[in-house]
Image: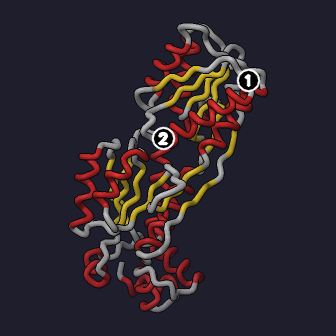
Amino acid sequence: MSIQKIAQLAGVSVATVSRVLNNSDTVKAKNRERVLQAIKESNYQPNLLARQLRTARSYMILVMVSNIANPFCAEVVKGIEEEAEKNGYRILLCNSGSDIERSRSGLSLLSGKIVDGIITMDAFSKLPELAALIGSAPWVQCAEYADAGAVSCVGINDVDASQHAVSQLAEGGRRRIAMINHDLSYKYARLRERGYKSVVHLKGLDYQAVEYASDLCSRAGMAAMQKLLEENPPDAVFAVSDTLAAGALRAIQQAGLRVPEDIAVVGFDGTELADMISLTTIEQPSRDIGRKAVDLLMNKIDSPDAPTERVMMDWRYISRAST
């Protein structure tokens, strides 16, 4: 399929198709939509090498994910890819595991001009090291909201969301509310723990217990829950991910206890898993977070001197059978 055929299908000029492919802002929205629809229907693949030679861009984005096995991360990446494709870009995915050496390997693509910008989902504590490696290249931090610094970012208010989840448990009569957290090198983990502890204090609850899971997986959530059950078990658990909450549910059931009668469980992220197991959760707009990260990155690519942007997305509490 040629660019001329795309123009015929869309009912526009070849020049208009070319401007759409090169992300020109002079194209009318109606014509842009026609061209993008024609490209989608015909499965047209532009010659990226020719575009790179013509525009000095690679039309590739490096996406560095801390844990692609995490369903939330996977959903964010889907949003990133969808929005990148709308802008004529493709993504390169690096599962960094928040390991700085693996990150260094991925970021070597910058020096070779193989990518035009980076979206990271790494631990907040790694940002200074990443900043030294990335330098002045266009960069957006995704799902780890920062209220200061020079890196544009997008995320949710983790403190508010956590406070709401724990408050719902307390207002439902739960007095021994525990938390299953993850690695405190991630800012979201620190912020969600802050939200949990603030409600425990404000509600005057005598019980406070935090277990730290070794990984964001069901197995680690199960192990953390088993520790919480050993002495003075809680009557409610707030977990910082749906996968950890799923493991907690399994441990509770294996101990011969009932959910929610004996122990209520709340997760975080609002993944498909939560729906499948009827888990009460805080739903993050995962795909919208990914899409917004791309918008912020496109702005940085097009206008390198543009000011830092920080976007706070909405979240939603979904009540299900686990509470």
Residue at (56% x, 11% y) in the render: 229
Picture coordinates of residue 170 (x, y %)? 74, 26
Q: Is residue 74 left or right of residue 207?
A: left
Q: Please name whichever residue, 178 or 74, is drawn nearer the observer in this view of the structure.
A: 178
Q: Is residue 201 left or right of residue 92?
A: right
Q: Are marks 2 and 1 in contact (CB under 8 Å)?
A: no
Earlier in the chain: of badge 2 and badge 1, it is 2
- Element assignment for label 2: helix
Residue at (65% x, 52% y) in the render: 314
Image quadrant in which you'd find residue 59: bottom left
Q: Is residue 259 visible?
A: no
Label 2 CA crowd tier, 10 Å (few <14, some 14–19, many 20+):
many
Q: What residue sits right under mark 1 in the picture? A: 204
Q: Please name whichever residue, 46 or 93, is drawn nearer the observer in this view of the structure.
A: 93
Q: Is residue 174 left or right of residue 67?
A: right
Q: Is residue 38 above or below residue 194?
A: below
Picture coordinates of residue 310 (x, y %)? 55, 61
Task: Assign the N terminus to one quadrant of the image.
Answer: bottom left
Instruction: Report how far apart the C-alphas of labels 2 and 1 lie in the structure.
Output: 35 Å
The kind of residue on which mark 2 rests is Pro
Residue 71 marker? 2
Q: Please name whichever residue, 151 or 94, is drawn nearer the observer in this view of the structure.
A: 151
Image quadrant in which you'd find residue 267: top right
Task: Assign the C terminus to one quadrant of the image.
Answer: top right
The kind of residue on which mark 1 rests is Gly
Q: How is the image coloured?
A: secondary structure
Q: Nearer the viewer, mark 2 or mark 1?
A: 1
Q: Is residue 31 visible?
A: yes
Q: Please name whichever residue, 287 or 230, is drawn nearer the observer in this view of the structure.
A: 230
- Element assignment for label 1: loop
Picture coordinates of residue 88 (x, y %)? 41, 72
Residue at (47% x, 74% y) in the render: 306
